[in-house]
Image (cartoon, rainbow, N blue to C red):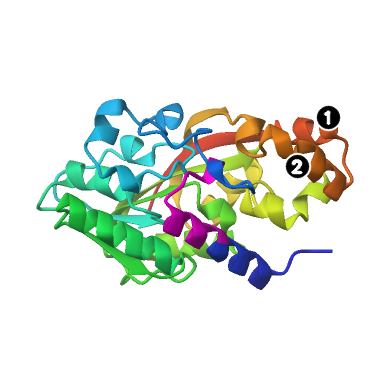
Amino acid sequence: MKIKDEEIKKTVRKRYGSLARSGQSCCQQPSSCCCSEPDASPTSGLAVGYSEEELKTIPAEANLGLGCGHPTALAELKPGDVVLDLGSGAGIDCFLAARRVGPAGRVIGVDMTPEMIDRARANASRGGYSNVEFRLGEIENLPVPDSSVDVIISNCVINLSTDKPRVLREAFRALRPGGRLVVSDLALTRPLPEELSRSLEAYVACVAGALTEEDYISTVEAAGFMNIKIVAEKNFPAELLVEEARVSEMSRALGLSPEKLMESLSSVVSISIRAEKP
């Protein structure tokens, strides 16, 4: 049976609201969700491309270990750019972008979880970021005017949307002509077994909602973008999606053998896509 969109949205909002309140890494939770490293140390995030120097320049509370890439590093941001972050969480990518665009630029983070918005705003205040703001909203209905931003970034969030084509059409709408889209996300090298694709837990873990690489590119293209390229790709370890202690439990719940579950999860990769609005 197909998971209902509203059930997915409600579960995602609840899970990430809990993360925002606790301040724990995603990987410390009893249920899986997409994350970058199996700990919440100050250096959590190194595995997906953040440098130690970068992480030292932002509030530690902004790093919840939720990313699967480093889109800010690939976006070629310039002083004065207006940047929009889709699914900004506690603000890590917004704060890194703010340093690159400088006082003449502006960064807007959008997140649908009130608790994340509160945490991000507190982090911005703590760090003295006058060129960053956070807006409560859904990435399927972005709270920004048409053609108002230069660059859109997103880090392991679009896969959680139940309407990815609409997200990308909204991104296209918000960008100025010549603007850039740079997203890091989880994708699949092959389709998942049906048992896994209809699992709500696997959806919140950024697995069941992931597109194949080919479908991801096609969806970006259908939204109107051009010059679409996968600019980075690497394997995403299965143990970061489902902790070892829960493999047997999840296997039983899905009706898959542990071997089949882990083999299926090995199809998950982290990709970064760059595209332009004509």
Q: Position of residue 277 (x, y in %)?
A: 37, 53
Q: Which residue is mark 1?
A: 259
Q: What kind of secondary structure does the magenta stretch mostly adopt?
A: helix
Q: Position of residue 94 (x, y in %)?
A: 29, 50
Q: Residues within 10 Å of mark 2 (few under 14, many from 20)?
A: some
Q: Residue at x 71, y 35 (%)?
A: 245
Q: Nearer the viewer, residue 86 or 274?
A: 86
In the figure, residue 187 lies in which quadrant?
top right
Q: Nearer the viewer, residue 93 or 20?
A: 20
Q: Which amino acid lies under the numbered mark 1 shown in the image of this protein?
A: Glu
Q: Position of residue 213 (x, y in %)?
A: 62, 40
Q: Which residue is mark 2?
A: 191
Indicate the secondary structure of the residue bearing disc 1: helix
Marks 2/1: CA–CA distance:
17 Å
Comes first in the chain, label 2 or label 1: 2
Q: Is residue 203 magenta?
A: no
Residue 103, compared with residue 270, is above or below; it is: below
Side of 122 where 74 appears, left or right: right
Q: Which amino acid lies under the numbered mark 2 shown in the image of this protein?
A: Pro
